[in-house]
Image: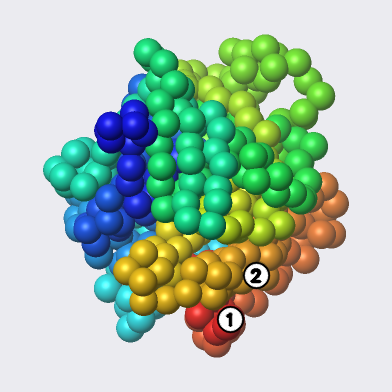
Amino acid sequence: MTKTGVDRCQVVVAGAGPVGTTIATLLAKAGVSVILLEAGADCAQDLRASTFHPPTLEMLDEIGITKMLLDKGLKAPIYHWRDRQSGEAIAFDMAELSDVTRYPFRIQCEQYHLSRALAERLETYPNADLRFNSRLLTFEQDDAGVNLSVETMTGIERIRADFLIGADGANSIVRKWLGTEFDGFTYPERFLTLSTDVELADYLPNLALVNYVSDPEEWLVLLRVPSVWRVLVPVNGSVDEADLLSEANKNGIFQRLLGEGVDVKTHHRTLYRVHQRVAKSFRQGRVALVGDASHLNNPLGGFGMNSGIHDAFNLFEKLLPVIHGKADLDTNLALYDRQRREVTHSFTQTQTKANMALIGGTRDDAHSARRKELTEIRDNDEKRRAYLLRQAMFQSLKEAALIR
C-alpha cells in the first residue's frame, strides 16, 4: 500500500472463478502486477461446469495446468446423443480430430479444481496478490486508470489500477456499474442437477461418460466426473422449489431413468435458472468483461466455461501489448470486443440454442426428425468432421480469428 493509503497495480481482476484465475495467471506469468479479488472465502465450488474441450486444454497447457486436469479428470473421447425411448446411442468420437489436436477428447473434471489450483499457483508470483473476502463495491475510470473501492472484513480499501477486468459472473457488479445492457432471455424451465455415486452404467448399457438423452417428455444430460454421475434435467419453473428438490421428485426422476424400485442416494441437489444473454459490449474504456459477466448460455455442449477461458486468452493477447506501450488501447480492446462478442452471437449462442432444440421438444415428429438429422451427420464423413470441429469449439476460434 502506498503512503496515500491506496494500493497500486497494473490490473485488477474481479472474480476468482476459472476465468478470473486464468487471466490473472496469464498476467502474472507475463510479469504484470495483478490483484485478484474474490468476494467469497475460497474459489466457489460450482457444480455446473465440468467439461474441458480440446482447444481449452491446449490453451491451459501454456500456463502449465493441463496436466493437473488430465490427472484429476476423466478422458471422454466419445459422447452420445441417446434416444431415451429406443435406447439407441448415436456416438461421436473425438479421436477423429487427432490430426488437429494433441488432446482429441474432452476432460470431465469439476471446474473448481482449475480455479483452486491456479489460485494456489498465484501465491507463488511476487507480482500477484489474491484477496479472498474482498468484494468490489464501486469503481470509476478516467483516461489514465481505474479507482476501485473494495469491501473487506475490516473496512473499505482503495485500489488504483491501470485496467479492470470483470470476471465476476452472471451477476457481475462490473457490468452493472458500466451500465452495459445484458440482452437475451431466461428459459421458462429451471434446471435441476443431481449427483450420485450410483453407477448408472450398471442400469443403462453402453453408457458413455458424456450423454445427451433426447426424449419428447423428459430429456436429460448424464455426465460422469471422477467422483460421481451428474444428472441434469429440466423441471417446471412454476413448481415450488421445495417440491423440485424433494425426495419424491428425485425418486421419480431416477425411477423413470433406471427403472422402478431403484434406490438412488444423491450428494447434491442444485436448482438454477438458465439464461441466454450477451452483453452489448465486452469493454468500455479501461474496463473489460470476460466469461459469464459478458455472456450466458445453456449448458448443452459444455461451452460456457470454455468460451470464458477463450475470452481470457484473447483479452490477454490484446491487453499485454497495451500494457507494454506497444499497441493502442482502443484499437486492441475494440478488437477483443468484436472478436469475442461476435463469435458469442454467431457460435456459442447459436449452437447452444440448437443443442437445446435438438435434445428437447415435445412432439414425436420433431423428435424423430432430430434423430434422423444426427444419424445423417454421423454417417457422412464430411458432415461428421465439421460437426466434431464445431462441437469441440475449434470452429468458433477460427471464426474469431477472422474478425478484424
The residue drawn where x is 76% and y is 41% is 187
* Nearer the observer, 28 or 229: 28
Q: Give the x, y percent position of residue 346.
A: 67, 70
Q: Is residue 147 above or below residue 181?
A: above
Q: Kindly state the secondary structure of the residue where label 1 is placed.
A: loop
* Nearer the observer, 277 or 264: 277
The residue drawn where x is 77% and y is 66% is 369
Estimate the spatial distance between the alpha carbons at disc 1 and disc 2, rounded to whole Å. 8 Å
- How crowded is the residue under tag 1: few (<14 C-alpha within 10 Å), some, or many (20+)? few
Q: Is residue 345 above or below residue 293?
A: below
Q: Is residue 334 above or below residue 356?
A: below
Q: Quadrant of residue 17?
A: top left
Q: Give the x, y percent position of residue 379.
A: 57, 79
The residue drawn where x is 68% and y is 34% is 273
Q: Report the residue that reaches farthest toward the bottom.
A: 382
Q: Quadrant of residue 196?
A: top left
State the mark number for residue 342.
2
Would residue 259 be visible to someone looking at this image? Answer: no
Q: Quadrant of residue 236?
A: top right
Specify which label sits upstream in the sequence, 1 or 2: 2
- How crowded is the residue under tag 2: few (<14 C-alpha within 10 Å), some, or many (20+)? some
Q: Give the x, y percent position of residue 366.
A: 82, 59
State the mark number for residue 403.
1
Would residue 316 be visible to someone looking at this image? Answer: yes
Q: Give the x, y percent position of residue 91.
A: 50, 64
| Callout 2 amino acid | Glu
Q: Report the residue that reaches farthest toward the front.
A: 3
